[in-house]
Image (spheres, coloured by chain):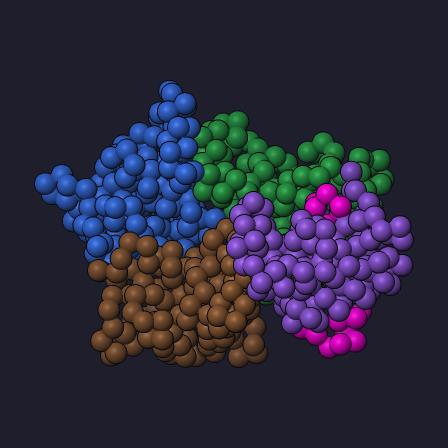
Chain colours: A purple, B green, C blue, D brown
Amino acid sequence: MTLGMTLSTAEAITSAALEKAVELKLKPLTVAILDAGGHAVLVKRQDGSSIMRPQIAAGKAIGALAVGTGTRWLNANAESRPHFVNALNGVSGGAIVPVPGGVLIKGESGETLGAVGITGDTSDNDEACAVAGIVAAGLVADCG
Amino acid sequence: MTLGMTLSTAEAITSAALEKAVELKLKPLTVAILDAGGHAVLVKRQDGSSIMRPQIAAGKAIGALAVGTGTRWLNANAESRPHFVNALNGVSGGAIVPVPGGVLIKGESGETLGAVGITGDTSDNDEACAVAGIVAAGLVADCG
Amino acid sequence: MTLGMTLSTAEAITSAALEKAVELKLKPLTVAILDAGGHAVLVKRQDGSSIMRPQIAAGKAIGALAVGTGTRWLNANAESRPHFVNALNGVSGGAIVPVPGGVLIKGESGETLGAVGITGDTSDNDEACAVAGIVAAGLVADCG
Amino acid sequence: MTLGMTLSTAEAITSAALEKAVELKLKPLTVAILDAGGHAVLVKRQDGSSIMRPQIAAGKAIGALAVGTGTRWLNANAESRPHFVNALNGVSGGAIVPVPGGVLIKGESGETLGAVGITGDTSDNDEACAVAGIVAAGLVADCG
């Protein structure tokens, strides 16, 4: 029932993402890995990451799954047609966070395996860690 | 801001809880560790654990924190005065799962550090794993 | 707009209620004082009172105001006709806690000035403190 | 479980904040002090402060805790990237009020102890009172 995403793969993505954060000297992060059905497989909040970060991280990941591409696409849409992103917020029950850092996780043949959402530093840095984690696990990142 | 509960302690509790599950040959589990303020520090869903398990695990942990003792106490109250437990569900926005398996994590001097919620097998087995994890980390378990 | 209940009266009720708790050697309490419109005037959570106590205390007080008498009446109704109390929970958006400890605050001529809700010890002890606070402020307590 | 914030410290912050309001001749205020986990420790609504002020005050304080800095930062973000602040509102269940007046309370070593939210006058004046209260208690204010 962990659709396309095993706990061990989620652990590998998360560890590599957090190593990248150390390398880039980022602020404390929170990482959420969701399976292809949008359900949490792994959530980690580093010491000092603020209290609502788990919801923000999951909101980025669910945003990516909601539209089938990374949240950089949603961020652009929030500027070009905000009424669409507002509506997505509505139909999702307020679950989506449309800023970079939600990245779709794909297999070699292009199938969606899940998504990772990271938050805590700038959106660009959050996304860089997500991509590093996905690539380290031998998978394909779709940032949007 | 991971109040009273570091990520490394949460990892230690979770690992020991899942080892206990292997020993007891339980079904796939989901573990949620919340800090003392009720915010997720670590969530792990094992392969094959069903999709709403993260919410159930967190709901047991938040239930323990809400009333200041493990959810075995809430389970007993649900039988003796169901209107109180129904009301708790209401004031918490439906966040509480009042069955055994939500265990308060206390330090040596009795201070609350957080709570663990486990779900996937019987409530008694879920709770046994939670206690095993807390004890392995050198902390004190309050089952209610 | 603090209908019938000034902050200074709320402070007086709360102080006397918490002095009663010291005298009875109760566990840490949370006190909520609402005005006659059901809006908070004063909320105090003592050190060690668990995290959802503010909602529980307010839920007792709003329950008293909802039906125009103390929550001891709601507690009895929860046993004699649970469907009514369930329905009250529904129409209130889950805001009501129907156990003793929510006490209506009345003036000398019988007018409702507000309500106090207390939680943290047994419901009977919570209610005893609420009554002590109201009486000390020269007002009339209606427990239901 | 009043994480990082005792009731006596909350009383000291609130008293000093309300003295500042007298000095500045402000309108009636409502003050909410939350612990580091976002749970109310003390709420005071002055006579004449309107009925939804407790939720607004708490919404400023929870906003500060959610992102780990004062709500002046959220106010700036609401202008530069409104879709992010809208999303925060969604993932928080509508709990956040992103205007100045929610100030993080930190200890000498930089650890977060809680947050204060004040509302009733202009946002700038609300914030000035919050800072005055925190400083009077010997703590460090982070306005964002």
What residue is rendered at 49% in x and 67% in y? D78
**Residue A101, magenta (yes or no):** no
Can residue C52 be seen here? yes
Toward the viewer: D109 or A35?
A: A35
**Residue C144 image offset from top left, x and y in percent:** 27, 32
**Residue A69 image offset from top left, x and y in percent:** 72, 55
Q: Is residue B128 left or right of residue B56?
A: right
Q: Is residue C34 above or below residue B74?
A: below
- What range is drawn magenta here? A19-39
Q: Residue furthest left?
A: C109
Toward the viewer: D50 or A67?
A: A67
Can residue B43 be seen here? no
What residue is rendered at 58% in x and 38% in y? B97
Q: Is residue C42 left or right of residue A129?
A: left
What residue is rendered at 50% in x and 38% in y? B89
Task: Give the image quarter of residue A133.
Answer: bottom right
Question: How many labels sit on residues?
Answer: 0
Q: Is residue A113 above or below residue D142?
A: above
Toward the viewer: D114 or B114?
A: D114
Task: Give the image quarter of residue A58.
Answer: bottom right
**Residue B88 image offset from top left, x and y in percent:** 48, 39
**Residue B67 image offset from top left, x and y in percent:** 51, 45
What residue is rendered at 33% in x and 75% in y? D125
Q: Is residue B7 left or right of residue D16?
A: right
Task: Give the image quarter of residue D6.
Answer: bottom left
**Residue A37, magenta (yes or no):** yes
Q: Is residue D106 left or right of residue A144?
A: left
Q: Residue furthest top?
A: C80
Q: Residue furthest front?
A: A80
